[in-house]
Amino acid sequence: LVDSKLEESDRMQSIAESWVTDPSSKLHFKNQKKKYGRAALHSEENAAQGREDARRMKEARILLDAEKNANHEGSKLGKIDRLVMKTRALIDAVLPGNPLETDPSCTRLVDEIVAHKLKMNDGSDETNATQEEAEQVVKELLSRCSEAVKEIQQLQSRFGTYQQFGFGKKRSKNSSNGSTSGLVRAEWVSVGESTSTKKSSPDALVCSLSYITTKKKSSSASASLDNNDEVQKKTKPFIVKVNGQHYHKLRRLFDKTYVSDDSSRTNDQMTHVFHAALFAIIIRYSTLAGGQQLNVLRGGGMQGAIHDTVFDCFAKWFGTHGSGTECFASPFNANMTQYYSAFPSPDIDGFFGSHGDFFRLNANTLRPGWYEANPPFSPGVMEKMAKRLMDLLDVARERDIDVTFIVIIPSCRSDRNNNKDGQDASTERRKKKKRKKKHKHDSEEDEKSNSNALTNAIHHSALSSFNILVQNCSSHTVLSKRDHGYVEGSQHLRPTQFKESQYDSSVIVLRSKSCKDIDTEEFETDLRKAFKSRHLIELQQRRDCD
């Protein structure tokens, strides 16, 4: 879904660019009428092309609606950037609106499912059946995604967007009497028991945020009739939680960015806006991670981060903390003052200091310094990142700017190594078939083999972008799995913060100028020390506290 959303953004960008270069092409979309009934059906031979044309027409209409608003507002952005920014306000921030099975992200997902299922079935020859099953899974996923987007649009048309939380205007004193659509209330809970007072240690507290809907006052006649029904049918609040450490961190980021822009609000009003924004980003990033993050803490891997000691290492070798920028961060895991996140700015992330989407960074505003890029380990994101970094390096060299990009991604093996792994796996399967008894360690090996099959499929998809980075790098360090670690992607929800890496990672340094002043061996020594896993140390500390 992350890659599919990225492809949707690229399609919008392509349409906007074509309108700027050839304004007459816009007339085709303006004069095109929407088809209904049999006229909307496509013949079987042209079904794929028909669906693609219909999607392009839908996205063009969104751009036309955005253009109406963009033309009435002045902006320092160019015409294309201004149009794309306005478009993002009309589409969902997380889910793609019109994904198709023929999209590159969908074909990659089919390949990953097929590789995983073949490994589960011990390499059976039912490839065609497995392919059809994988395609059906992806088709169902796309159908659910489209239905969810339609439902969100209906809800927004009924209740409005997040501006009703009070982001756009002051919250009036009488807003609690039904003038707003909802209220976010915060309650501090100690580990294991409730408390109404905040303790000194933020790590021992959890903030529980409850979104409570409020209704407008009814007339006196209807109020007397519906009084009993309202008592019996009270709206159940939706509750999310965040640990105390991240609550205070996000409040500091919020105060630095938002409070300084609006000093006319009272402290209570600012706290309300902060709680509403905090509630919104918790929901949004949980959705981005698959929707299971809030309940079972699953899916946070794509928001994993590097240790703060790694940032200290980068600042030591490539500049200072003030000259550093995070390219793929979030308000939860950001370490640097300058950071980009998954969503455009201004947006909810902008309330916490985010500069928006890194892919929208204007090359003309590129400043000297070092940039840390630890993207979600998704092939589409990594491929676009590699191309974008090459373009930015070319601009930096033309302008004679000293820029360093430090990229942290999984180490992709070559095709030879992948083929060797496949041969080893086939030999292992033949040995297992000869065994008559299954032991406990056999099931563990099967689980590990299944994981390797999926990893190899993803590595194969990301190999081209990996090679682009390695071929143009100044330094490449490979960190062995379990010898290094990361910060949990669900760090704002978990009691623990660190995890061991389950795969080899590559730290690739790209520089616009020569790095003769860098002692490569000493840098790698500092890097491995900074990346050393803290997982076991954290577990031991928790045992000692217990």
Image: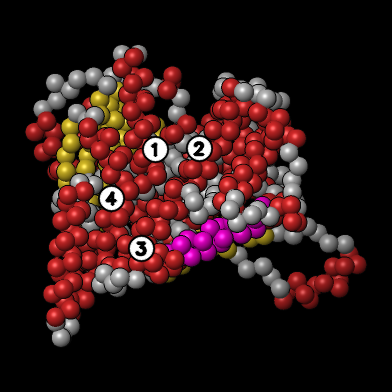
Name the image quarter holding the C terminus.
bottom left
* Magenta-span inclusion, residue 366: no
Question: Tag 4's secondary structure?
Answer: helix
Q: CA distance from mark 2 to mark 1?
A: 10 Å
The three-letter amino acid code for the residue at tag 2 is: Asp
> Is 539 situated left or right of 244 in this image?
left
Residue 167, horizontal then vertical, whole percent: 63, 41
Of all residues shown, which one is farthest toward the left? 521
Task: Determine whether 193 is above or below 86 in the image.
Answer: below
Q: In terms of secondary structure, what is the magenta stretch mainly? A: helix
Residue 314 as seen in the image, left or right of residue 383: left
First along the sequence among labels 2 and 4: 2
Number of the front mark, 3 or 1: 3
Decide if residue 435 is in sight here: yes
Q: CA distance from mark 2 to mark 4?
A: 23 Å
Rendered view: 488 above or below 375: below
Q: Residues within 10 Å of mark 4 (few under 14, many from 20)?
A: many
Tag 3's secondary structure? helix
Tell me how far mark 1 sits from mark 4, CA to CA. Answer: 15 Å
**Residue bearing the label numbered 4:** 459
Q: Say which of 459 and 271 sits in front.
A: 459
Q: Earlier in the sequence, mark 4 or mark 3?
A: 3
Reading the image, the residue beneath label 2 is 10
CA gap between label 2 and label 3 equals: 27 Å
Labelled disc at residue 114: 3
Which amino acid does the dot numbered 4 rest on? His
In the foreground, 338 or 66: 66
Which tag is nearer the camera, tag 2 or tag 3?
A: 3
Q: Are marks 3 and 1 in contact (CB under 8 Å)?
A: no
